[in-house]
Image: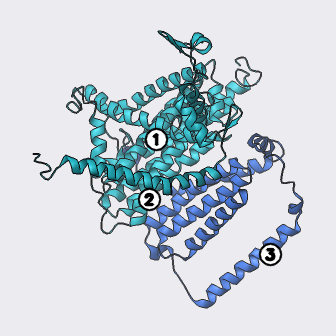
Amino acid sequence: MVDAVFLALSVLTIGSAIVALEIRSLIYGSIALMLTLSGIAGFFLLLDAPFVAMFQLSVYVGSIAVLILFTVMLVRRELIFNKIEDKRRRYAGIGLMLALMLGIGMIIIGSGMKSIETNSPSVDYKKIGEDFLTYYSPALIVMALILASSVVGALTLARREDMTNDQRAD
Amino acid sequence: MSTIAPQFRLSRFVASLFDIIFWVILIFSLVGLPIVFIILFYIKLPVINNQLMTPYLAMTWMADPSETLPIIKNLIHTTFFHVLAFPGFGFAALLAAATIFVERKFLAKIQLRVGPLYCGKVEGILQLMGDGLKLISKEIIIPAKADKPIFWVGPLLFVGTAGAFVSLIPVARGWVVANPAVGLLAVFATIGFFPIISVLTAWAANNKWTFIGGLRALHQMIAFEIPLILSLLSIVIMTGTLNLSQIAESQQHYWWIVFAPISAIVFFICILAELERIPFDLPEAESEIVAGWLTEFSGMMYGLIQLGTYLKLYAFAGLFTVLFLGGWNGPMVWPPFPADIVTQGITIGPITAKIAGLPLFDQDMLNGTLWFVIKTVGVILLILLPRGVFPRIRIDMLLHTGWYKLIGLAFINIFIALGLLYAGVLGPGGLIQ
């Protein structure tokens, strides 16, 4: 059962990733990207990590894909993309991808991943939270600082000098 | 001689009836029965009273009323029934349909009108059925330059997403379709699909009104999703769980609205915005942009969107009940099932019928459902109320409210919750258990 679901998810994820790259229409491309990201959420569900799966759905599909869709719909295509297409670049891209996949695959196979116990119970999300607040707390603080600085940066960029507050009466 | 069918002859009518019956029996026995057996070959049949449930046994039992109840009882606890009928789609669709009618009458009473009146003699009670029939019988018109695949799939996806949302709401103890450990996160993930569907269908219709409406819907839903999530964090902090059933269970003694009133208010305002209801109905502002992102939908496609909207309304009201108003918890008002009927059977004159397995639902579940429905209907009426009172607000005010005021307000209650937790009032080992 799990194997069939895994196969179906793999076909969905990889197939829609290829569609996202290859299709002419940008809107359909972004829909295919959403399908890919949902497929990855499905993989997380299969791996007994519903917490990560739900965040994958709500962050990647719910927000980032929406941003991409927004950009694609509102900005003219020539402004975003400058498409250079020839055979050599294409084959070089495929070759680069294969080399990368092989390299990453070798690293994963070479690491201790194969000896992981697969029948162990799934990790509770409360445990993740505990780990974040104890052992990994420096990482959490650094992440919080980065996020806060990016929020401040976004606010600074979005601030408009030409609009006074009394214009925006509420 | 009838004027409708001048060539009518009774003998031919009867002959045609026999003809139809003959063909039905023939096709059923040659095609239907083999299909039934092929399906039964793959389904795992249940064991009831130490007997394997075969179709013949089921029919034998159905002929005997005292044996029918265990079958029904078994059916009620299947996933099939949960999804289609009780905590799932059927129950929600019934409440949603009732909401549509009640909304029209309720708003009419607020504004000193009469509302639907003629259809069905008594206060227009059949108006809803008439509207449904009208929607089904109308032609589906698709704009010539529309992007047809997305346009067709949009309403179906909308209803499907709303159904997924409904399936997460627990109605009574143990009565929920899907009960994941991260239920609240699943709710957030499901809500995230609505803006995508509305903006995609709006784009696909290839109409300026729909596109303006779709962009407004996107702006509005994204802006209000963040305060919505933040306002629920205080509940998560106080309960220490993301499972909706456990959150409802934790409110046996007091409701969370007591400790998180600001969260409740923020959440309620976000519900109004997410549902595109007045005063936040900019995506379908009928006086500015025809019907917003719904402009090009006709017939049953519009009907599906409407069904999805009201399912979403029910689901949000149910979520408010579960999170803030104690869910199914309430005083036991449902009378217990009379014990005489179980032990002695029903006596009518000389006949005594002893029916096995009679308390079909236990008292706890019926009481829980009663309280859940009462609270949810109350919240639904509160959601409907602003429509009769408020005007539509401007989009800059809307975005200012969402991104600025509500987020700030939501943070206040998070700090209150943290303070209660660290002061030892709530939580494990706290003053109030």
The hue of chain B in the figure is cyan
Are both tags, 1 and 2, on one chain?
yes
> Mark 1 or mark 3, which is nearer to you?
1
Q: CA distance from mark 1 to mark 2?
A: 18 Å
Q: On screen, A4 above or below B347? A: below
Give the residue type at disc 2: Val
Give the residue type at disc 1: Lys
Looking at the picture, the colour scheme in use is by chain
Front position in the image: B7 or A82: B7
Total number of numbered discs in the rendering: 3
Q: Chain of mark 1?
A: B
Give the residue type at disc 3: Gly
Q: CA distance from mark 3 to mark 2?
A: 40 Å
Checking the image for residue B274, the label placed there is none
Checking the image for residue A103, the label placed there is 3
Q: Which residue is mark 1?
A: B312
> Mark 1 or mark 2, which is nearer to you?
2
Q: Which residue is mark 2?
A: B153
Q: Earlier in the sequence, mark 1 or mark 2?
A: 2
Task: Indicate left or right for A112 with B247 as reference.
Answer: right
Q: Position of residue B161 (x, y in %)?
A: 50, 49
Residue drawn at point x = 88 percent, y = 69 percent: A110
